[in-house]
Amino acid sequence: SQQGEEDPQALSIQEGENATMNCSYKTSINNLQWYRQNSGRGLVHLILIRSNEREKHSGRLRVTLDTSKKSSSLLITASRAADTASYFCARGDTGRRALTFGSGTRLQVQP
Amino acid sequence: NAGVTQTPKFQVLKTGQSMTLQCAQDMNHEYMSWYRQDPGMGLRLIHYSVGAGITDQGEVPNGYNVSRSTTEDFPLRLLSAAPSQTSVYFCATGGLGTGELFFGEGSRLTVL
């Protein structure tokens, strides 16, 4: 499989703490995206970082990309119970429109 | 705007039966795709289309057919269902540039 690896597979934290999820990949990418999936729902796009960017912010989200290490991280600051969901990284490979998804991180934020 | 609409939301089939999962979008996106989601395996691409009349295979195309006769619709057909096709199926659309995808709410299929 060409899917990336995400870790941890599951993460449980208290409200107010920060949550960090990591994603590694093996191919050359055009961009790296992060999606959120609430239980029983479709995926929702959170943030996209291009291969020539190193860091991107959106509200409480911070994404970093290290193309030399072929890895990305998603940081959610000051987490809330409503952040409880599964988070997936997806890479946009060079020359290919389709996205390849990782296996996801299940985040549980305890109130 | 409805976005991406998938029907049915739930379906139970017997082995060997056929059915079609429907996907319709009203965002005028050229790109449409089908993924399946299985526990612990993330999403895997089945088929995709970059425009009307154009389709191509993804990572796990066997057992599935698609067609794209209009920009709005991209049905996924199971010709002879097998228990291994028990999964949650997602349709996702987007513009042709390598940007974000917009997902439907999913179709949960059980094959007995």
Image (cartoon, rainbow, N blue to C red):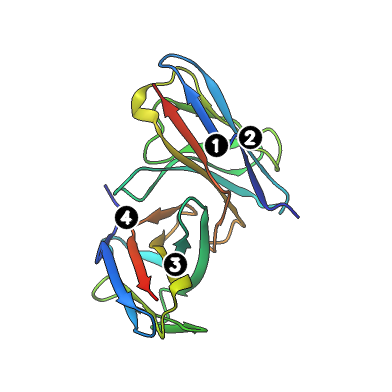
Q: Are marks 3 and 2 on the same chain?
A: no
Q: Are marks 1 and 4 on the same chain?
A: no
| Residue assigned mark 1 | B55
Query: Do residues under tags 4 and 2 come within 8 Å of each other at their CB atoms?
Result: no
| Residue assigned mark 4 | A103
Describe the element under mark 1 as helix, strand or loop.
strand
Describe the element under mark 4 as helix, strand or loop.
loop
Please give the name of the residue rendered at 40% of the width and 16% of the height, measured from the top-left corner: B15
Chain designation of label 1: B
Quadrant assignment for the C terminus of chain A: bottom left
Query: Do residues under tags 3 and 2 come within 8 Å of each other at their CB atoms?
Result: no
Q: Residues under labels 4 and 2: Cα distance? A: 28 Å
State which quadrant residue B112 falls in: top left
Q: Residues under labels 2 and 1: Cα distance? A: 7 Å
Indicate the amino acid at tag 1: Thr
Q: Residues under labels 3 and 2: Cα distance? A: 26 Å
Query: Do residues under tags 3 and 4 come within 8 Å of each other at their CB atoms?
Result: no
Q: Nearer the viewer, residue B54 or B17?
A: B17
The image's mark for residue B68 is 2
Image spot of residue B67 (x, y percent): 60, 31
Query: Do residues under tags 2 and 1 come within 8 Å of each other at their CB atoms?
Result: yes
Q: Nearer the viewer, residue A34 or B32?
A: A34
Going from N to C along the chain, the mark reached first, 3 or 4, is 3
Label 1 or label 4, whichever lies nearer to me, is 4
